[in-house]
Image: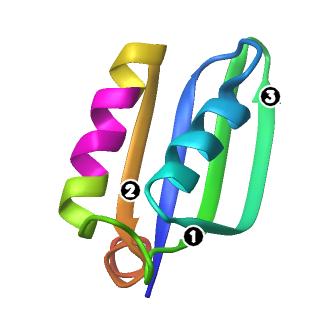
Amino acid sequence: MRAVVTVTGKDRKGIIAEVSAFLANKGVNVEDISQTILGEYFAMIMLVDVSEATADIATLAREGEEMGKKIGMSIRLQHEDIFNAMHRI
């Protein structure tokens, strides 16, 4: 089962490392990643495999939001199907 993780906020060092470590500690595997810097802002989207995660998607999403607040970023995790449905025209 896959999910989409989005991370946005003010750019600084270590964002990718912190988010990747968080996901790895939860048993989540990063399958693909794209990131960019827009002026002073950071934007990243990750496609992740949550089939071996230590928690369900709702828990991972909540913990990701909490972690985002601690590091000054917005972190959202959504099931791939929900993400696709929200972005379908």
Quarter of the view holding residue 21? top right
Number of the label disc, if any, that sits on residue 48: 1
Is the residue 33 above or below the residue 19 in the image?
A: below
**Residue at 38% over, 56% down:** 77
Relative to 86, 5 lies left or right:
right
Of pointers 2 and 1, the one earlier in the residue sequence = 1
Image location of residue 8, percent across then percent down: 55, 32
Relative to 1, 82 lies left or right:
left
Start and end of the magenta stretch?
61-67
Quarter of the view holding residue 3? bottom left
Within 10 Å of disc 2 (Cα), the crowding (few <14, some 14-19, many 20+) is: many
The stretch drawn in magenta includes residue 63: yes
Image location of residue 63, percent across then percent down: 28, 41
**Residue at 71% over, 36% down:** 16
Please, what is the three-letter code of the amino acid marked with disc 1? Val
Give the residue pinned by disc 3: 37
Within 10 Å of disc 3 (Cα), the crowding (few <14, some 14-19, many 20+) is: few
Element type at mark 1: strand
Q: Quadrant of the C terminus?
A: bottom left
Element type at mark 2: strand
- The secondary structure that most of the magenta stretch takes on is helix
